[in-house]
Amino acid sequence: MYLKIGIFFTIISVGCGFEIFTNNHEDNKIDILTTIIKENFVYNGRHTFLLIGMIPDQFYSKLKHLPVTFTITDINKEDEQIEDVVPYPSNYIVFSCQSRNEFESALFKVVTLPYWHPLAYIILVYQSSYDTVSMAQMFYAFWYFKAINVVIIHFDDIHETTYISYFNPYTSSSFELDHIFGCWTVKKITMPISDLDGLICEQGCHNVSIYSKLRTNNLGTCLSFSTSVLSYKNPEAVKKLILFEDKSANYHNYSMNSFAIELDPFLSIKADNGTYTLHKRDGQIWNALSKLMNFSIDLTMNEPAWKHDFDYITNMQEFVSFTQRKKDLVLLPMYQFDVMVVELDNTVPLQDSGVCFMSHRAGFETVVFDLKLFKNNIKMIIEFLLCFLCTWLAFIIFNIEQSRRISFDQIGKDFVNSFRTVLSISVHKPPRRGSFRIFLGIAIWSFFVLNFSSQAAIISFFSVYKKGKEVDTFEDILEKGYEIEGILSPDVVLPETEEKFKRINSKVVPVQNMFICPERMKNDSQRFCLVDCALGRFLERNFLNNGEQYLHIARQDRIHSHYLQMIMHKHSPMTVRLNKYMQMMIEGGLINKWIDYRFDDIKEGAPIKPLSMIDLKGIFQGYCMVLVVCTVIFCVEWLIGIIRCFKKI
């Protein structure tokens, strides 16, 4: 069953003073503004206009057919505080400002309101003179707060024209709009700005290349924008403009500064003359996403890291850099609950995983007599005994037919002949009559064929090469008492709600990565490892010690069971489309197919060891027991014979 979760979109109008609508061209300006809103309005829930300043009644009348609510606020006044305000993400945010200072005050107030949403459609009516540098700085100010769907409108009453500008922060060598600017923050991105003076924009993008420190540390961005000029007399022309294009549909080969670490069997990176190719499960996922959304992945800045083994501290440092917008993408999946102190966009889970216990595979034990195995095969034992009795009966019938009498002495000899037949020893006193010899041969060999296959299995009851008990539960771990090695992070700690959890937590010893412990286990099996469950399943099948599999993943108890997911910046424009494509790949079976590729190099399990003479000692012990019984019976018969002789004397 699928649940449709809808987001309520809000329309917010923030006015810094609407004197621009109080002249002779009021109708033309209102028509252009309302046409843009109506053409791009989406009916998907409750809608609200938040207004600052005075708005002409005509503005309301043209939008009254929309299911919206109008709310008024002011930049220079404190709003009434409402507890537990429900944040309705906005569909439209409309600014109207006379100057740079008014725009600055309005922007820094709006981003604190519960109706602010970076992916909203934003319209800024800016009455100051048109200047490309100021335009770039205002666009960059919106981008600083992650807003990408922004339109800035200038009204020129003298020439009765309207300048409508829109921008794209994903500018590349293969895509750029009319005006190109490189922008960055004065302070490092980790330090918030308090006014627009903290933003710098210069024409050209030579200072903010993907390898520059400004891009990494100061949110350096190469943005471009275009401006369309329309006449007041033709407001309908605005319908032909594509103002709020879905940026995630096509990134125009924009280079994403990415972080990745090679982690077999999930991600493999191959370099060839400065070109990087991604392989295996995660690599195939990002290869598909980059083609579908038309962006490129750049790992040049990450090259010193991805060549080394997985290191938790390095991974967390890069992850923090990603949350600070120093990186565009993280190619490694994370557990859904890993990060609780920063805001991120969750995506569609791609695989079930968690943190599991890994131990050395249990060895084999030689058991002299296995009662459980005996009980499980009681049916076969009965069949064997019936075959033996039938063989004995065949001998008895033969001797009765031959001698025309019954004697216990002959029945005993027939019993011995039955043993000889079962053990493939020559028959004692074979039959002399040819006709009955044929019958006896067919009967005996028929029974022999039936019971021969069961003899080897019955022998195994007395000498079993049995595998020991695997470690699968918390109790098994505590019983062994070994140390537990794993990456020390909050998600590998059990809640201390039970005494056994406290005891297990006390045995955890930190290591740098998940491969150290399995390697140590080759030479010292007295330890446990904490590993990612998906990785552990791969290591269990493919890690070999002297050609044999030696690892085991606990099947019953584990630290936690959580799904893996790719992570995005909070309110990233890529999130919705990435979720859509990920869902398609999962439902189409592509993810499972790429996961199966992990096992291209599957090794066969440990070879079966032949039983040695020491392992077969149980058979000889059983044989000796039978000899002892026979000897006792023989001695009893001998004593009885001697006693009878003395009585006759």
Image (spheres, helix red, strand yellow):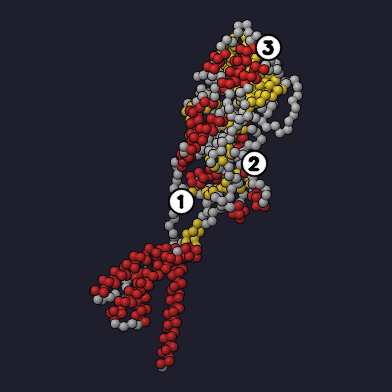
How far from the left and from the top, in percent, is residue 48?
A: 65, 26
Judging by the rendered image, the residue that carries numbered circle 3 is 22
Pick the residue in front: 214 or 93. Answer: 93
Name the quadrant of the C terminus: bottom left
Real-space Cα distance between discs 2 and 1?
36 Å
Reading the chain from its start, which is encountered first: label 2 or label 3? Answer: 3
Above/below status of 427 relative to 406: above
Residue at (45, 46) in percent of width and height: 603
Above/below status of 122 relative to 456: above
Residue at (50, 25) in percent of width and height: 294
Dot 1: within a 10 Å radius of its alpha carbon, few (fewer than 14), some, or many (20 or more) residues? few
Q: Amino acid at mark 1?
A: Ala
For this view, does 636 lie left or right of residue 333? left
Q: Amino acid at mark 3?
A: Thr
Judging by the rendered image, the residue that carries numbered circle 2 is 490
Pick the residue in front: 155 or 320. Answer: 155
Pick the residue in front: 296 or 273. Answer: 296
What is the quadrant of residue 435 in the picture?
A: bottom left
Real-space Cα distance between discs 1 and 3?
87 Å
Above/below status of 559 relative to 647: above
Query: Does dot 1 land on a helix, a strand or a loop?
Result: loop
Q: Is residue 271 visible?
A: no
Q: Nearer the viewer, mark 1 or mark 3?
A: 3
Reading the chain from its start, which is encountered first: label 2 or label 1? Answer: 2
Residue at (63, 36) in percent of width and height: 339
Query: Does dot 3 land on a helix, a strand or a loop?
Result: loop
Q: Nearer the viewer, mark 2 or mark 3?
A: 3
Reading the chain from its start, which is encountered first: label 1 or label 3? Answer: 3
What is the quadrant of residue 417 in the picture?
A: bottom left
How far from the left and from the top, in percent, is residue 82?
A: 73, 30
Judging by the rendered image, the residue that carries numbered circle 1 is 606
How far from the left and from the top, in percent, is residue 386?
A: 39, 70
